Image: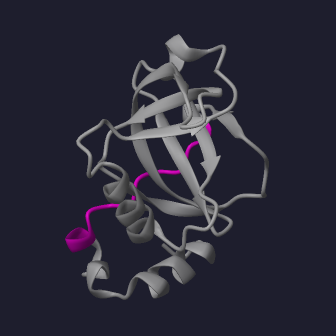
Amino acid sequence: MLHVTKLAVGVRDADHLSALQADRMLDGSPLRHRTRNFPRRRPEVIQGGSMYWVIAGTMMARQLILDIVEDRREDHTPCTSFVLDPEIVPLIGRPTRPFQGWRYLDPDDAPPDLPAMGAIGGLDSLPAAMRHALRALCLL
């Protein structure tokens, strides 16, 4: 198994990512994230790998990658689509330097999922901006 990291450009937090993706799925099609390059290690990624989203400099959410397929953009140029599970799993944040495209992420290097909010003192009641700031400081 192998994961993939990707910058979520223009996304404020995991809730904003979820809202943007929900808009894309309104037509009933599977959730896809399009990118230019096809991963050579596709078989390893689709065996349980996730897309780890870097939001505002912090790796803070992930989604299971269901498939990776050759696709075409609206202007008919070829591209690659990562077919994603719509469920966004929050992570214990880890600062990440900017990069272009996507990168492979070894499972041993992946940040852990954020424990269930109720299990760690009601963090779900904090505003999203505060949770983001605490994750950026690696306090969550």
The image quadrant of residue 131 is bottom left
Rendered position, 50 above or below 56: above
As for residue 26 lying within the magenta part, the answer is no
Q: Residue placed at 48% from the left, 72% from the top?
A: 140
Whether residue 47 appears in this view of the structure is: yes
Rendered position, 96 above or below 102: below
Report the magenta residues as a range: 109-119
The type of colouring in the image is one colour
As for residue 117 lying within the magenta part, the answer is yes
Residue situated in front as seen by the camera: 103 or 120: 103
Q: Residue placed at 51% from the left, 11% from the top?
A: 43
The image quadrant of residue 73 is top right
Whether residue 2 appears in this view of the structure is: no
Q: Residue placed at 25% from the left, 81% from the top?
A: 122
* Number of callouts: 0
User: Of helix, strand and loop, which mostly describes the magenta segment?
Assistant: loop
Q: Horizontal and vertical percent for residue 59? A: 59, 58
Rendered position, 46 above or below 127: above
The image quadrant of residue 75 is top right
Q: Horizontal and vertical percent for residue 93? A: 54, 64
Residue that extends furthest to the front in the rendered view of this protein? 75
Q: Horizontal and vertical percent for residue 118? A: 20, 73
The reply, left or right, for residue 1 in relation to residue 40 is left
Q: Residue placed at 26% from the left, 46% from the top?
A: 27
Residue situated in front as seen by the camera: 52 or 20: 20
Rendered position, 5 above or below 67: below
Q: Horizontal and vertical percent for residue 10? A: 61, 68
